[in-house]
Image: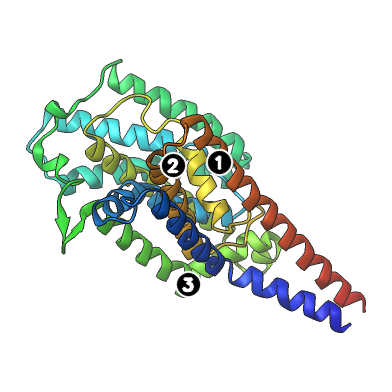
Amino acid sequence: MTENKAKESLLLKVAKHREFGLIVFIILLSIIIQVINSSFLTLSNLNDLLTNTSILIILSIGMLMILLTRGIDLSIAATLALSGMITAQMLKIFPETHPIIAILIGVGIGIICGLILGILVSKIGILPIIASLGLMYVYRGLTFMVAKGEWVNAHQMPASFKAIATSKILGVNTLIFIAIIVFLFFWYFMTYTITGRRIYAVGSNPESAIISGIKVDRILILVYCMMGGLAGLSGVLWVSQYASAQGNTASGYELTVIAACILGGVSINGGIGKITGVLLGAILLGILNNALPLIHVSPFWQMAIEGGIILFAVIFNVIVNRRYEENQLLRRVI
């Protein structure tokens, strides 16, 4: 009995303090990389690292809410591309458009895309993976149709729009600043609001959530709309950062976003995950993307290393959850 309690206590500590383990791993990894290449921890490189990771952080926060409800959204990269392309085309025709208006248009397009997916999942009952996979191709096709096979390049965009990715607010790069604001808003939303707690409840036990009076359909539509809005925002920021809008923008990026969530301890079975863990997972991937080229690792090995770390995180999550459930069951039997 004492041994079982000790095991349960250890598993509880591991489950509750995964973020601490991620922080330790990130620090150790950074030290190793700095020893190999002393330019890694310079202010300029760290600024580049955080700037390049900002969009991943924003998208990962949206994906967290989707995964918490036992769903998944494979259409986010296509939504990003579509919102970025429409915004770029609009700026091409109306270069005097204020950057904030461009951002609002991108967010609006993303919300519409997310609303469509939310309705397909919550009202029609299509599995999230199937619905989002279909819409991924629809949105990507629409992006190519809007683009008419052409790019929108830097010369066709106003300087004020491109300055979104290069300007600073309170001394912080605008992309980083926006990511911080998004993180703080959703951290408060998920931690302290009733709706945030209901999102966890829907993923933990959908049947109990319905019995307790939670409008599951509304929650699902809400999270998909929020994910779509964040994808739309990311589309505008992406086009501003790279000063280019293409039909294949961010192709495959949805897998990177899902990977960041898994590294952050989010369960694909729903109901388990913290926004701080997702933040650390995104930063870890950002460090790998930034550091591996610095230490002259082959691009092919970069993919293998990232895949290995993600696989390790998944296995670790499965083992911890399974052992904890076994101990809980054994405790009830005893």
Task: Determine the secondary structure under disc 3.
Answer: helix
Percent x, y of residue 270: 63, 57
Identify the image quadrant of the C terminus: bottom right
**Residue for badge 2:** 292
**Residue for badge 1:** 305
Q: Which residue type carries mark 2?
A: Leu
Total numbered badges shown on the rendered structure: 3
Marks 1/2 in contact by CB < 8 Å: the verdict is yes
Q: In this rendering, which labeled residue sits more in front, label 2 or label 3?
A: 2
Q: Which residue type carries mark 3?
A: Thr
Q: Which of marks 1 and 2 is nearer the N terminus?
A: 2
Marks 3/1 in contact by CB < 8 Å: the verdict is no
- State the residue in front, 242 or 37: 37
Q: Specify whether residue 68 is in view.
A: yes
* In the displayed structure image, the side of residue 242 where residue 53 appears, left or right: right
Alpha carbons under labels 2 and 3: distance apart: 35 Å
The residue drawn where x is 76% and y is 68% is 324
Percent x, y of residue 319: 74, 58
